[in-house]
Image (tube, rainbow, N blue to C red):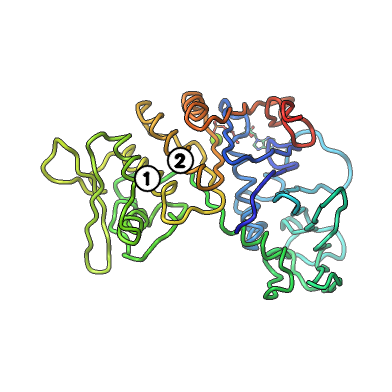
Amino acid sequence: MPLRLTSVSAELYRSIRRIQVPVERLTVLVGKNGVGKTNLYRSLELLAAAARGAITREIAEEGGFESVLWAGPRAKGPVRLKLGAEFGDYAYSIEIGLPAPIDEAALTATEPMVKSEELVHRTRGEALTLMKRQGPSAWLRDEDGRRQSYEEALIPSETALSGFRDQGRFTELDLVRRALLDWRFYHDFRTDKASPIRQPALAITTPTLASDGYDLAAALATVLEIRGEAPDIEAAIEDAFPGASLVTEFGKGTVSIGLKFPDLPRPLGVHELSDGTLHFLCLVAALSGYRLPAFIALNEPETSLHPDLTLPLARLIARAAERTQVWVVTHSEALAAALEIEAGVAPRVVVKQQGATWIEGLKLFGEFAEQE
Ligand SMILES: Nc1ncnc2c1ncn2[C@@H]1O[C@H](COP(=O)(O)OP(=O)(O)OP(=O)(O)O)[C@@H](O)[C@H]1O
Ligand SMILES: [Mg+2]
């Protein structure tokens, strides 16, 4: 049973000065352009990258530490970008910074490096640290509760979260890593004519759609062939394109899909579908796959969809949120309103306050006002 995410936090990441956001079964964030919705989504991606040990590389690829750092006023002293995820009683956090001018090993003075990490277990008001990393050294509590120290064991780009995998000795760290590794992120799907999504996919059983959607045909075919029935997929397609049905076709080691529309004698293959139709099929595969990841984050899923598809999309997301945790950021108020009707979850409004991303009704320490 994967851990259930209960809140995420970020500090000094782009437009986020400091925020802790409670995470529900379905979290819907709506807001105008530029308020920081994608930055919130991206901070979740960085947490998942920490579990793969790729967080500093991703920050470098994004333009480097200085570029992703909150550009507004900051306290004096060493600057740290902080991210955290809470899974019920377990809280993981990580801090990224630049090398100290002296005595810290890094390739360059601008290499983002992991400064510290922590995993804490809180019960009945008491906090027990299970893992603590400072620079290259870390200690972890083993299954007998004893601290195991690892001096000079980690390089700046490594995370303790990804690095310490000691079959069952550090069970809680394993659980948190596995939960984060399972997260899936869906932003843009390439729907241009040359997109690999429009090509046949390798016929490999695919329980979960890849973030880029390139295994779309395999993911849909997996539900149809392995499960033998796909009521969620059929319902979503009927909802969006009344009378249409999904068809699969196997080639030599490949699988293709198409849509059979009531008014056309032959099905249309993925190479013939419109951008919006293909985008919707990708969302169907992401949200009705054979196995849903423990957490799915969608960034502006309404992109390139006609308003007619808003309600079918909301129903698709609502059905997925019955099977797993879903996080949606959108600038479509229509989608947010439809989700409130379909899933009974009120959207949260993302705003900017003094240049910083904030959510209306959120209190400083990660609760919404009405939750009290
Ligand atoms: N280093 C930084 N420091 C402070 N603010 C930043 C930094 N980098 C980007 N921003 C701000 O973040 C905002 C962009 O955030 P983001 O892309 O998350 O917005 P969004 O809500 O997703 O918008 P859209 O609806 O247009 O996609 C911009 O207003 C930009 O000025
Ligand atoms: Mg955005």
Residue 306 percent coordinates (x, y): 35, 29
Residue contact between numbered discs 2 and 1, judged by CB atoms under 8 Å: yes
Q: Amino acid at mark 1?
A: Asp
* Residue at 56 percent of width and 49 percent of height: 295
Rate crowding at label 2 as few (under 14), some (14 to 19) or many (20 or more) other CA atoms within 10 Å: some
Q: Which residue is mark 1?
A: 232
Circle 2: element type? helix
Determine which quarter of the picture holds residue 345.
Answer: top right
Quadrant of ligand 2 in image = top right
In which quadrant of the rendered image does the N terminus lie? bottom right
Q: Is residue 222 visible?
A: yes
Residue 47 percent coordinates (x, y): 65, 52
In which quadrant of the rendered image does the C terminus lie? top right
Circle 1: element type? helix
Q: Disc 2 and disc 1: Cα gap in Å?
A: 8 Å
Which comes sooner in the sequence, label 2 or label 1? 1
* Residue at 70 percent of width and 51 percent of height: 87
Labelled disc at residue 126: none
Q: Amino acid at mark 2?
A: Arg
Determine whether the beta carbon of the residue marked 2 sits less than 8 angstroms from the nearest atom of ligand 2: no
The answer to whether residue 336 is above or below residue 168 is above
The answer to whether residue 257 is above or below residue 262 is below
Q: Taking 139 as reference, is 346 left or right?
A: left
* Residue at 36 percent of width and 31 percent of height: 309
Q: Is residue 96 visible?
A: no
Residue 129 percent coordinates (x, y): 84, 59
Q: Which residue is mark 2?
A: 319
Rate crowding at label 1 as few (under 14), some (14 to 19) or many (20 or more) other CA atoms within 10 Å: some
* Residue at 28 percent of width and 58 percent of height: 200
Residue 34 percent coordinates (x, y): 59, 30
Determine which quarter of the picture holds residue 40.
Answer: top right
